[in-house]
Amino acid sequence: MRLGPDALLMAEGEVADALYLLEEGRITLTIRSESGDVQVGELEGPAQFGELGMLLDRRSATARTQ
């Protein structure tokens, strides 16, 4: 799939049902905190992400396109 900027791919806490393969582009990973969202990572394709959620059954972070 092709997504524009700031598109939500997965949200923290959702049921994890897929592993993502990023061919090109950039993804920002954030987690919730009491003071708001905190950026914990940034990926640039080629990369993969979402594997931890598959192990835990829930998404551990939110991923958005840049």
Image (tube, helix red, strand yellow):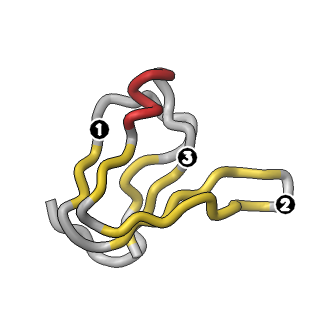
* 31 lies left or right of 6: right
> What amino acid is labelled 3 in the image?
Ala
Residue at 30% of width from left, 49% of height from top?
A: 48
Quarter of the picture holding the C terminus:
bottom left
- First in sequence: mark 2 or mark 3? 2
Q: Nearer the viewer, mark 1 or mark 2?
A: 1
Q: Which residue is mark 1?
A: 19
Q: Position of residue 30 (x, y in %)?
A: 59, 57
Q: Secondary structure at mark 2?
A: loop
- Residue type of the residue flagged with mark 1: Leu
Dot 3: within a 10 Å radius of its alpha carbon, few (fewer than 14), some, or many (20 or more) residues? many
Q: Position of residue 15 (x, y in %)?
A: 44, 28
Q: Give coordinates of residue 3: x percent, y percent.
A: 24, 69
Looking at the image, residue 54 lies above or below residue 65: above
Residue density around tag 1, few if under 14, some if 14–19, many if 20 or more, within 10 Å:
few
Work out how far the residue at label 1 is from the one at label 2, CA to CA, in angstroms: 29 Å
Using the rendered view, name the quadrant where residue 45 is placed. bottom left
Helix, strand or loop at label 1? It is loop
According to the image, label 3 marks what residue?
A: 61
Q: Which of the two marks, 2 or 3, is nearer to us in this view? A: 3
32 relative to 43, above or below: above
**Labelled disc at residue 35:** 2
Mark 1 vs 2: CB contact within 8 A: no
Q: Earlier in the sequence, mark 3 or mark 1?
A: 1
Q: Quadrant of residue 6?
A: bottom left
First in sequence: mark 1 vs mark 2? 1
Residue depicted at x 37% and y 47%: 49
Which residue is at the far front?
46
